[in-house]
Image (tube, coloured by chain):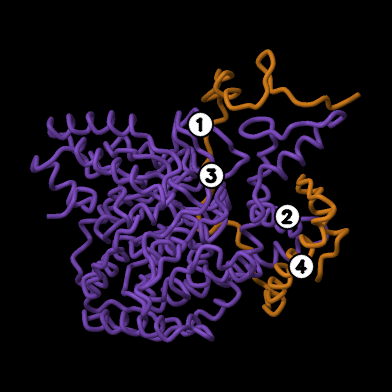
Chain colours: A orange, B purple
């Protein structure tokens, strides 16, 4: 399956990467060749084969549902590009 | 007499315990060799003050008789491990100046044992690459050069800085991470030892995530013994990583006796790739002969789904990466692109991710987004997960037939030149992982051992793959192979 320029634009948008229009053609070509490489998997018969969801057959651990950490506001915010009054700050979301 | 920086972990441990030198002395010598090796671009951050402070404390501990194996040993840390108060960027612009408020479990384990942090090591951006060229810091350079050539070669990737630093004696050992071969391929390219442990052996907490079902950290060292010592120090059962295992952690070093009599070593015929160089082929048979001479049985085996491992990997790893890297949104940490007037939050996200991620990372995030998107999920992602099951079953079958370890080449070639792959199809670079990637897909331990020099005078490695949780037995087979191979070459210093 080959990826055309429109599909590349759609994928870039889903991935939230603003690829400039003039680069999309080339991106489409690269993605196509990688997807083409994956097409080999079509040869494999996977009838009655379960998808692997855990490489080591162990159950995920559970813990008691209690607060075990917190009160770290300043540490949480310390690496943010923009903060105001103890919050992350972002460009305006609604007009 | 060897320079202090040339010593192995076990030699430093001995020297410290016998008071031949102090940790401060070894640390200072390492810092000096780092300072004079800018050309290698192996370190992205040097933490001299922290190192000297830690070395003083470790000398005190040793003096007081409290000396765990790693106490006083100076090491380098791949830039993927979060280190409290020390810049951690995963070699990406999007994590520009990110300074963690916490320490990864693996590095914490090492500092608790008294190991010394020399600094952070160069790598491919987010560990995506096989040549270290995708790094925002620029490529790390291999201390090895081909005979009669002054061309810069890649130390491999993604743990290229770690491999270069160990091979050039800038540190006693280093830690790396391996998602598809990122410890073992650079180890092979630099004549060093690297082991990726069983999935779950080492905690992933505090390690910047690439593909969570494949990522494992591991040691990169100058000997198999050192790999055993460092692996034991890194490993722990960690409640902060839900896939970290509660399996007991044996004394790996104690398992090293080089007795492999009666062990059954498999040679998978599917790894004899079309167009494989004669050199690699020869090295591989030579390794098999040596194991036979040491008393092992060498048996031809089949791993029929091997050829599908790379396509499976290049569906699953980008899919997991596209999810893991969704957190880089310009809000919580690192880089945010400058806004233009009228930009809303969506434009801020997209521009930040375009300017912050390099080309290879963008490519993989988009591939991952594509294979997970509505309409393609079953055809690519789910299909790949099912073929992954078959790849693991191939290994389960040979192990249940009584095979103890599998011998393969580590890489399809020797180290290539910086820039050599730039204009090629990305798939060409992906082929570097052809012998290593199956091991991550099946969650197994795999170790790369330096095996010899190519006709161009460059190191080549052999890989041994072991049963899950049996790193001790695997390292012992590697130890026997190391003993037989007697590889002792070092790169000629030009930097």
User: Given this view, does label 3 or label 1 mark the residue nearer the observer?
Assistant: 3
Residue at image mark 4: A32
State the mark number for residue B366.
2
In this rendering, position of residue B346 left or right of residue B101: right
Q: Position of residue B299 (x, y in %)?
A: 36, 85
Question: Which residue is nearer to you in this view: B324 or B346?
Answer: B346
Q: Chain of mark 3?
A: B
Residue at image mark 1: B100
Q: Say above or below: B458 vs B236.
A: below
Q: For mark 3, does the 10 Å Cα neighbourhood hold few (<14), some (14 to 19), or many (20 or more) residues? A: many
Q: Are marks 2 and 1 on the same chain?
A: yes
Q: Say above or below: B169 vs B110.
A: below
Give the mark, 3 or 1, whose residue is nearer the N terminus: 3
Q: Position of residue B338 (x, y in %)?
A: 74, 32
Circle 2/circle 4 CB separation < 8 Å: no
Placement of the C terminus of chain B among the 4 image quadrants:
bottom left
Q: Which residue is located at x 28 percent, y 42 percent?
A: B32
Give the structural element (helix, strand or loop) at label 2.
helix
Q: Which residue is located at x 21 percent, y 52 percent?
A: B7
Q: Would residue B402 be seen by someone viewing this image from the given angle?
A: no
State the mark number for residue B238.
none
Q: For mark 4, does the 10 Å Cα neighbourhood hold few (<14), some (14 to 19), or many (20 or more) residues? A: some
How far apart marks 2 and 4 lie (CA) works out to 11 Å
Q: Say above or below: B331 vs B156.
A: above
Residue at image mark 3: B90
């Amino acid at each position: 399956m080959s990826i055309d320029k429109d599909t590349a634009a759609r994928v870039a948008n889903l991935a939230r990467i603003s690829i400039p229009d003039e680069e999309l053609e080339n991106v489409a070509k690269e993605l196509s060749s990688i997807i083409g490489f994956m097409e080999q998997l079509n040869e494999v018969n996977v009838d009655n084969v379960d998808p692997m969801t855990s490489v080591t057959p162990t159950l995920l651990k559970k813990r008691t549902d209690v607060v075990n950490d917190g009160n770290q506001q300043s540490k949480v915010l310390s690496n943010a590009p923009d903060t105001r009054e103890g919050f992350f700050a972002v460009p305006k979301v609604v007009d | 007499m060897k320079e202090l920086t040339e010593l192995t972990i076990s030699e430093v441990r001995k020297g410290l315990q016998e008071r031949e030198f102090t940790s401060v002395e070894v640390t200072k010598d390492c810092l000096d060799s780092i300072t004079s090796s800018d050309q290698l671009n192996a370190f992205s951050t040097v933490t001299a003050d922290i190192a000297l402070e830690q070395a003083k404390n470790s000398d005190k501990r040793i003096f007081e008789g409290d000396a765990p194996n790693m106490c006083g040993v100076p090491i380098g840390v791949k830039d993927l491990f979060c280190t409290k108060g020390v810049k951690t960027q995963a070699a990406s612009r999007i994590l520009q100046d990110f300074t963690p408020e916490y320490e990864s479990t693996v590095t914490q384990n090492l500092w608790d044992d008294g190991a010394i942090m020399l600094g952070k090591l160069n790598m491919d951006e987010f560990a995506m690459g096989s040549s270290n060229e995708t790094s925002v810091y620029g490529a790390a350079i291999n201390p090895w050069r081909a005979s009669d050539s002054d061309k810069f070669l890649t130390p491999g990737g993604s743990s290229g800085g770690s491999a270069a630093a160990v091979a050039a004696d800038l540190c006693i050992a280093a830690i790396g991470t391996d998602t598809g071969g990122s410890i073992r391929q650079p180890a092979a390219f630099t004549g060093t030892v690297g082991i990726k442990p069983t999935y779950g052996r080492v905690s992933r907490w505090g390690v910047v995530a690439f593909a969570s079902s494949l990522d494992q950290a591991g040691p990169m060292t100058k000997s198999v013994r050192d790999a055993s010592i460092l692996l034991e120090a890194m490993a722990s059962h960690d409640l902060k990583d839900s896939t970290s295992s509660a399996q007991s952690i044996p004394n790996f070093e104690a398992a090293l006796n080089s007795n492999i009599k009666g062990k059954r070593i498999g040679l998978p015929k599917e790894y004899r790739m079309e167009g494989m160089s004669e050199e690699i082929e020869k090295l591989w048979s030579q390794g098999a002969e040596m194991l036979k001479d040491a008393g092992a049985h060498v048996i031809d085996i089949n791993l029929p789904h091997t050829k599908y491992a790379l396509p499976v990997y290049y569906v699953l790893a980008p899919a997991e990466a596209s999810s893991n890297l969704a957190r880089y949104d310009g809000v919580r940490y690192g880089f945010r692109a400058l806004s233009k007037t009228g930009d809303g939050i969506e434009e801020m996200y997209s521009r930040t991710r375009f300017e912050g991620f390099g080309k290879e990372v963008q490519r993989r995030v988009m591939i991952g987004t594509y294979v997970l998107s509505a309409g393609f999920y079953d055809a690519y992602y789910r299909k790949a997960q099912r073929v992954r099951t078959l790849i693991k079953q191939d290994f389960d079958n040979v192990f249940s037939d009584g095979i103890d370890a599998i011998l393969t080449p580590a890489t399809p070639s020797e180290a290539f030149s910086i820039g050599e792959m730039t204009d090629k199809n990305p798939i060409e670079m992906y082929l570097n992982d052809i012998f290593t990637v199956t091991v991550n897909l099946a969650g197994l331990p795999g170790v790369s051992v330096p095996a010899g020099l190519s006709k161009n005078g460059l190191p080549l490695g052999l890989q041994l793959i072991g049963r899950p949780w049996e790193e001790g037995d695997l390292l012992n087979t590697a130890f026997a192979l190391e003993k037989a191979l007697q590889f002792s070459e070092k790169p000629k210093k030009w930097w």
